[in-house]
Each structure stands twice: as structure tokens, then as C-alpha cells.
Amino acid sequence: MSRVVFLKERCKGCLLCTQVCPKGIIALSGEMNQQGYKIVEVAPGKMEQCTGCASCAMICPDTVITVYKTVKPGQPVKPGEPGEEVARVNG
């Protein structure tokens, strides 16, 4: 299973990630960070729908998002990614 992690204190709530997520699982949360910005989250119960495409991480202007993509045994790993079970992608 892939997962998305947000650095909440750096998020400015621009919502670009919500627009590019092909599964529509990223949404504005009810939380605010210490800077007073509303932040995003993966909607509760939706993380298992994440495909690990990293579109959200690539579009984030503040590099707030890290995507951990599960690599299946025998699956080729792209150059620059670790050859372990979890590949980390950060925009």
C-alpha cells in the first residue's frame, strides 16, 4: 500500500494537490497549522486508495508532500529510487 505524508507546518492550503489526485482522496481538513493556514489531508479511510503516483508531491510548490510507494518484489525500480520495499517520492 502506498501512503502520503504531509508536513503540516509548511502547508499553505493552496489545494493544488487536491486537483491533481486521480483518486480524489486529498481534501481540505478542518485543522489549521501554526501559521494560520488550513491544511490538507488524505480523507479518513481513503489512504488504501492511493496508487503512489506522486502527482500531489510533484505539483506542491512548497514540497510539503512525500509519497511512499510500495514496490512489489520483482518490480523494476526507477533510477534514483531505493531498491527496497518502499520507494520515497518527494516533489
Image (cartoon, helix red, strand yellow):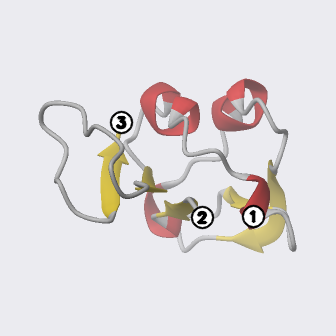
Is 89 on the left or on the right of 15, as rendered?
Answer: left
* Label 2 packing within 10 angstroms: few (<14), some (14-19), many (20+): some
The C terminus sits in image quarter: top left
The N terminus sits in image quarter: bottom right
The answer for how far apart the CA atoms under marks 2 and 1 are is: 6 Å
Marked residue nearer the N-terminal end (3 or 1): 1
* Label 1 packing within 10 angstroms: few (<14), some (14-19), many (20+): few
Instruction: Assess whether mark 1 and mark 2 are in contact (beta carbons under 8 angstroms).
Output: yes
| Residue for badge 1 | 48
Q: Position of residue 15 (x, y in %)?
A: 71, 36
Marked residue nearer the N-terminal end (2 or 1): 2
| Residue for badge 3 | 91
* Dot 2: element: loop
Q: Position of residue 30 (x, y in %)?
A: 86, 69
| Residue for badge 2 | 1
Is 38 on the left or on the right of 78, as rendered?
Answer: right
The residue located at (36%, 43%) in the rendering is: 75
Which of the 4 image quarters holds residue 89? Answer: top left
The answer for how far apart the CA atoms under marks 3 and 2 are is: 19 Å
In front of the other: 54 or 6: 54
The residue located at (75%, 37%) in the rendering is: 18
| Residue kind at label 2, given as amino acid type | Met
Which residue is the extreme one toward the front? 74
- Looking at the rendered image, the disc whose residue lies closer to the viewer, 3 or 2, is 2
